[in-house]
């Protein structure tokens, strides 16, 4: 089992390397920020490079995990499709080829013959990433791989990844905007129960070193049967007020209902994965989102880590219904194996009904109680 987690961490590190290379290397950076406008827009290929960066990372994760665990290959899914259509109507399937040269040739077809960019990417894709996680070597958990499924979000908070810079301003350790909220998310779930089991969150732009090169950081957790372990070492201080992070797009009525609970300690940040991480790290007590616009790949990894810490992520609407029906004996946790009830076909992997991510059951109850006064179920 430890070897799967090690494989996930290595795949997330390689992904973070690619994400950093796209910002650092001029030939790639120009493509990343280039916005095709007017008649040029659809001339060569329909989707643009930012989608390609996402797709490449997703394919790398799939390839590297499947190489070590072939039985998992059909059960790794993510946000992106790997088919690209160019202006000539040709569909190119992006994949990792056997050799670096093969991958470079394939990518150059999608990149309008830009050999430099294709070569740089292929080099990162075929680089060997090796990581020793000492805590994991001692671990002997036996989880059968034939029941596992994996959700991948190659780059969460894509907007901030493309446009974001190092954001100097932050409040209580939480960055409202900027590159820091970009995250590679890999979450493993049980295909029988739908429950999250293991998660890796990799922050490619965690801090800049003295040579002005970005360094990343990764976090992991496993929650399986009675085994709960994670990489979070920080002690979380006890505070009087509950602190909550939300999307700036959250409804005014929700912000208002939570204000008395939080006082000053209400925060806004980009990125579903980053907000999950703020909760994991104890920068806040909870992440509340009442819309349907997060997806299974946004929450599976943070959910597994929170679960390993005694917390979780519940379905917001269902939790309110439980409370109104005389609960709260059990608030329903998000599940990952099948589409949620009421999900639209086009967005069938949405977390329909919103969510509350939490570390402590007491905080969760206080939040659901506060919101039950304002929301009709
Ligand atoms: C997005 C991204 C957004 C988030 C949205 C996710 O994923 O994390 O930031 O919205 O829910 O689906 P918000 O920042 O308002 O919480 P992606 O960047 O991968 O599209
Ligand atoms: Ca996402």
Image: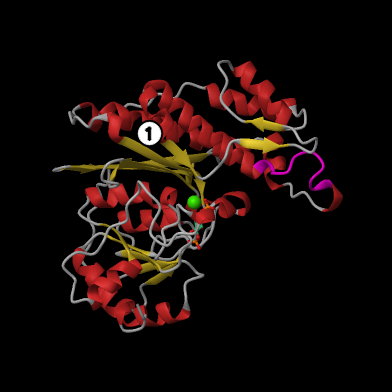
| Res. 241 visible in picture | no
| Res. 285 visible in picture | yes
215 or 143: nearer the viewer: 143
The image shows residue 353, relative to residue 62, as above or below, that is: below
Color theme of the render: secondary structure
The image shows residue 223, relative to residue 331, as above or below, that is: above
The image shows residue 96, relative to residue 200, as above or below, that is: above
Q: Which residue is mark 1?
A: 9
The residue shown at (41%, 50%) is: 296
192 or 80: nearer the viewer: 192
Residue 47 on image: x %, y %: 69, 44
Residue reaching furthest to the left: 226
Rate crowding at label 1 as few (under 14), some (14 to 19) or many (20 or more) other CA atoms within 10 Å: many
Is residue 182 found inside the magenta-colored segment of the image?
A: no
Residue 75 on image: x %, y %: 40, 34
In the drawing, does residue 45 fall left or right of residue 246? right
226 or 326: nearer the viewer: 326
The residue shown at (54%, 54%) is: 346
In the drawing, does residue 100 fall left or right of residue 257? right
Q: Quadrant of residue 83?
A: top right
Q: Which type of secondary structure does the marked residue at label 1 adopt?
A: helix
In the drawing, does residue 373 fall left or right of residue 41? left
Q: Quadrant of residue 201?
A: top left
The residue shown at (40%, 65%) is: 354
Residue 327 on image: x %, y %: 18, 73
Is residue 46 found inside the magenta-colored segment of the image?
A: yes
Q: Which residues are magenta?
A: 40-49
Total marks placed: 1
């Amino acid at each position: 089992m430890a070897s799967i987690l090690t494989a996930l961490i290595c795949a997330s590190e390689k992904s973070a390397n690619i994400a950093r290379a796209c910002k650092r290397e001029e030939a790639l950076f120009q493509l990343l920020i280039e916005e095709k406008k007017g008649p040029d827009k659809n001339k060569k290929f329909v989707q643009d490079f930012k989608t390609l960066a996402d797709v490449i990372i997703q394919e790398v994760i799939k390839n590297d995990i499947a190489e070590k665990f072939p039985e998992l290959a059909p059960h790794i899914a993510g946000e992106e499709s790997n088919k690209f259509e160019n202006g000539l109507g040709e569909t190119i399937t992006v994949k990792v080829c056997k050799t670096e040269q093969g991958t470079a040739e394939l990518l150059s077809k999608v990149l309008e013959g830009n050999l430099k960019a294709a070569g740089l990417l292929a080099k990162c894709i075929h680089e060997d990433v090796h990581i020793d996680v000492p805590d994991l070597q001692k671990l002997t958990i036996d989880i059968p791989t034939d029941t596992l499924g994996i959700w991948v979000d190659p780059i969460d908070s894509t907007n901030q990844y493309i446009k974001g810079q190092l954001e100097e301003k932050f409040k209580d350790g939480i960055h409202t905007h900027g590159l820091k909220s970009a995250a590679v998310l890999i979450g493993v779930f049980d295909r029988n129960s739908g429950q999250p089991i293991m998660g890796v969150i990799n922050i490619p732009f965690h801090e800049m070193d003295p040579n002005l090169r970005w360094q990343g950081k990764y976090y992991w957790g496993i929650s399986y049967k009675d085994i709960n372990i994670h990489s979070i070492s920080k002690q979380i201080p006890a505070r009087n007020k509950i602190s909550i992070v939300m999307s700036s797009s959250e409804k005014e009525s929700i912000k208002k209902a939570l204000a008395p609970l939080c006082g000053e300690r209400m925060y806004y940040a980009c990125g579903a994965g980053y907000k999950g991480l703020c909760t994991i790290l104890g920068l806040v007590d909870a992440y509340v989102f009442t819309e349907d616009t997060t997806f299974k790949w946004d929450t599976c990894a943070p959910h597994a880590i929170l679960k390993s810490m005694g917390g979780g992520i519940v379905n917001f609407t269902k939790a309110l219904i439980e409370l109104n029906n005389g609960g709260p004996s059990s608030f329903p946790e998000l599940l990952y194996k099948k589409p949620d009830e009421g999900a639209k076909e086009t967005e069938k992997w949405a977390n329909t009904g919103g969510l509350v991510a939490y570390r402590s059951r007491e905080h969760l109850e206080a939040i659901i109680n506060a919101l039950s006064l304002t929301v009709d179920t």
